[in-house]
């Protein structure tokens, strides 16, 4: 019997991940990450390791600032690399700022994410 191969639709995955973030659905948002995922954000000067720390990041910088994310540009390289340029709006001093996400996907989940702001 032939092995069933599931091909991930990365564009849908990213859109669903952004929707979970924009609706502040922590459980759904965290479901996009491997349990040992690493999220690095040079703009806050920290690296967050594991889902608990990713949840702390999400609570502080997204829920805490009522941050909403809009995709400006989406580039997919191969089967597991994604580059996103985004616009953030929220209750932070700038009210609107650009940003980027560099994402590595492994086993249909985010294994590494580098988030940064564009000033």
Image (spheres, rainbow, N blue to C red):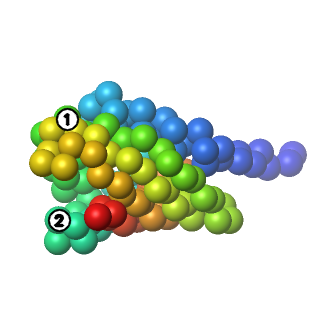
Residue 50 spot, x, y in % from top left: 26, 59
Distance, label 1 to label 2, CA atoms, is 17 Å
Q: In which quarter of the image is residue 49?
A: bottom left
Q: Can you say which quadrant of the picture contains the C terminus?
A: bottom left
Residue 71 spot, x, y in % from top left: 48, 45
Q: In which quarter of the image is residue 4?
A: top right
Residue 19 spot, x, y in % from top left: 42, 33
Please say if 99 is above or below 61: below
Q: Determine whether the residue tagged by mark 2 lies in a helix, strand or loop.
A: loop
Name the side, left or right, on which 62 lies relative to 12: left
Q: Determine whether the residue tagged by mark 1 lies in a helix, strand or loop.
A: loop
Residue receiving disc 2: 44
Q: Residue at x 24, y 71 (%)?
A: 42
Q: Which residue is drawn at 49% across and 35% down?
A: 16
Checking the image for residue 66, the label placed there is: 1
Checking the image for residue 102, the label placed there is: none
Q: Which residue is drawn at 55% across and 60% down?
A: 82
| Residue 30 seen from this side | no
Viewer-proximal residue among 50 and 11? 11
Please say if 115 is above or below 87: below
Toward the right, the furthest residue is: 1
| Residue 64 seen from this side | yes
Please say if 83 is above or below 72: below
N-terminal of the pair, mark 1 or mark 2, is 2
């Amino acid at each position: 019997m032939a092995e069933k191969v599931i091909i991930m639709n990365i564009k849908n995955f990213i859109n669903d991940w952004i929707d979970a973030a924009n609706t502040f659905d922590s459980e759904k948002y965290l479901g996009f990450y491997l349990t040992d995922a690493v999220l690095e954000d040079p703009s806050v000067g920290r690296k967050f390791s594991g889902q608990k720390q990713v949840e702390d990041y999400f609570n502080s910088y997204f829920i805490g600032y009522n941050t909403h994310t809009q995709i400006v540009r989406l580039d997919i390289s191969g089967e597991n690399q994604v580059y996103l340029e985004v616009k953030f709006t929220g209750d932070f001093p700038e009210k609107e700022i650009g940003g980027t996400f560099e994402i590595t996907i492994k086993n249909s989940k985010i294994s590494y994410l580098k988030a940064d702001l564009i000033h």
